[in-house]
Image: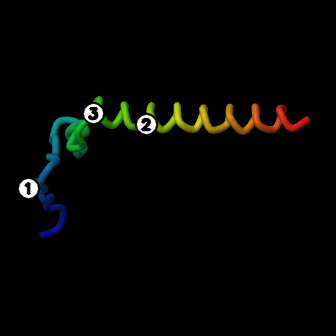
Amino acid sequence: MKGVLDVTTPGRWYDPISERWIEPRDTRTATPPRAEDDAVFERQRKLQIERIWRALVDCCARE
């Protein structure tokens, strides 16, 4: 049978009026970043800033 469309594709469907496949908007399966993750990132950032600051102070103190 020529021209037969598979209208049972999971996650999308065929709209005969517009003659196109309709796909649902992306559903968010991934969980949004948690506050704990943000806190860990912020803590790492602060530690890196402190490490750079100490290195800069030590470098200037030697001169």
Q: Amino acid at mark 2?
A: Phe
* Quarter where residue 2 is shown: bottom left
As measured in the structure, the alpha-carbon distance from the residue carrying label 3 to the one carrying label 2 is 11 Å
State yes or no: discs 1 and 3 in contact (Cβ < 8 Å): no
For residue 45, side relative to residue 24 (left or right) = right
Select label 2 or label 1 by which is in front. Answer: 2
**Position of residue 49 measured from the top left corner of the image (x, y, whole percent):** 60, 32
Task: Please tell me whether mark 1 sits on a helix, a strand or a loop.
Answer: loop
Q: Which residue is mark 2?
A: 41
As measured in the structure, the alpha-carbon distance from the residue carrying label 2 to the one carrying label 1 is 44 Å
Q: Few, some or many C-alpha atoms within 10 Å of disc 1 (few <14, some 14-19, many ≥20)?
A: few
Q: Which disc, if any, is residue 8?
A: 1
Identify the mark nearer the N-term, 2 or 1. 1
At horizontal 52% and vertical 31% (from top left) the residue drawn is 46
Q: Which disc, if any, is residue 34?
A: 3
Indicate the quadrant containing the N terminus: top left, top right, bottom left or bottom right: bottom left
**Position of residue 13 measured from the top left corner of the image (x, y, whole percent):** 14, 46
As measured in the structure, the alpha-carbon distance from the residue carrying label 1 to the one carrying label 3 is 37 Å
Residue 36 in view of the camera: yes
Task: Please tell me whether mark 2 sits on a helix, a strand or a loop.
Answer: helix
